[in-house]
């Protein structure tokens, strides 16, 4: 899954090409059946119109409503199963994708959205050299230099670099007693803990100690808070921005197979 997400443009193109090819085939077959029905069946006009309506509803329900609803509800559970299919499909449509990119998409992109110049941007190495020069000339102090260097190093870190490894993760079974969880929270002195079903690869949410204390005796599933899932290779800077935007305090780090690799907390 993370391998596909690292190239979202290719993934989107693969999905669109695959979807449209299936729809074209579906409409060709449907149109053939509708025309035969109109010409060969009694009261053919009525039945042809009925088939046309059924064809339209079939497309809307089967290719729009059902897939998107399932993906919205069970995205994490379905992703590991769907990813290999998309990977194979991506290889099949790759020649067509490259042709469309070279002959149509890239020329239109250059025409409609010319690339903006980034000559004013500084690379991380250039910023580091600028910091060293500024400190040498006395423009900034040692403390400021170290702080800014740590900020620069942050841009190179990935979620997997700072996560708590799976073997050290403290988690709790969703159907176990709230009292047992409260004992763990007090013993470990933690304020939030992931909750799972069956095993740590199936985390269903996070419990905050404060919410557990004000809801004594309630089933854990009723006081679960959503948990974020981030790829192990995700840039830490982006992860922190997402946490800030969603006000999340805990995220589960997943590996390329969708299994739990560890967690990140704020």
Image (cartoon, helix red, strand yellow):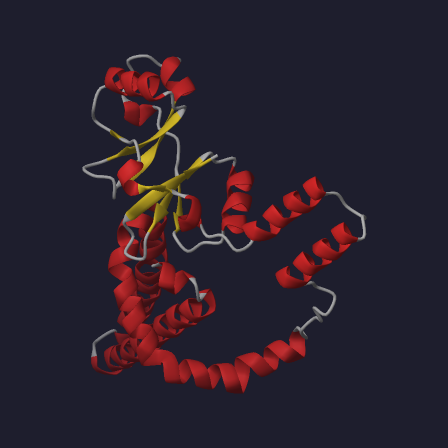
Q: Residue 206: in sight, yes or no?
A: yes
Which residue is situated farthest in the left direction here? 198
Tell me where residue 57 appears, x and y as whole percent: 33, 61
176 sits left or right of 46 in the view:
left
Asked if 196 appears above or below 262 in the picture, the reply is above
Outermost residue toward the front? 136
Instruction: Locate residue 66, reporting x and y percent.
Output: 31, 54
In percent of width and height, residue 213 lies at: 38, 14
Question: Which residue is found at the position 31% from the left and 47% from the top?
Answer: 261
| Front in this rendered view, residue 36 or 129 | 129
Residue at 73% from the left image edge and 58% from the top image edge? 130
Q: Nearer the viewer, residue 4 or 19?
A: 4
Question: Is the residue 98 above or below the residue 181 in the image?
Answer: below
Which quadrant of the rendered structure holds the N terminus?
bottom left
* Residue in view at x 72 percent, y 70 percent: 119
Q: Is residue 27 something one can see in this rendering?
A: no
Q: Position of residue 156 (x, y in %)?
A: 52, 55
Identified at 60% across, 80% down, the residue is 108
**Left or right: 231 as drawn, with respect to 121:** left
């Amino acid at each position: 899954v993370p391998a596909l997400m690292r190239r979202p443009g290719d993934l989107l193109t693969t999905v669109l090409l695959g979807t449209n090819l299936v729809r074209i085939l579906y409409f060709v077959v449907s149109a053939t059946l509708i025309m035969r029905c109109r010409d060969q069946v009694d009261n053919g006009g009525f039945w042809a119109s009925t088939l046309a309506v059924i064809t339209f509803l079939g497309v809307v329900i089967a290719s729009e409503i059902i897939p998107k609803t399932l993906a919205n509800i069970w995205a994490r559970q379905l992703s590991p199963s769907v990813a290999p299919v998309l990977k194979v499909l991506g290889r099949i449509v790759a020649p067509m994708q490259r042709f469309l990119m070279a002959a149509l998409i890239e020329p239109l992109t250059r025409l409609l959205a010319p690339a903006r110049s980034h000559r004013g941007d500084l690379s991380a190495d250039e910023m580091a050299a600028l910091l060293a020069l500024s400190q040498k000339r006395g423009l900034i102090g040692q403390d400021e230099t170290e702080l800014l260097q740590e900020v620069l190093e942050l841009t190179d870190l990935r979620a997997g670099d700072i996560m708590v490894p799976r073997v050290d993760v403290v988690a709790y079974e969703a159907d176990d007693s709230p009292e047992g969880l409260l004992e763990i929270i007090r013993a470990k002195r933690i304020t939030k803990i992931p909750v799972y079903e069956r095993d740590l690869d199936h985390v269903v949410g996070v419990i905050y100690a404060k919410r557990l204390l004000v809801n004594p005796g309630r089933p854990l599933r009723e006081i679960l808070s959503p948990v974020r899932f981030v790829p192990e290779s995700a840039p830490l800077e982006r992860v922190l921005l997402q946490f800030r935007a969603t006000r999340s305090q805990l995220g589960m780090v997943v590996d390329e197979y969708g299994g739990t690799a560890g967690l990140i907390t704020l």
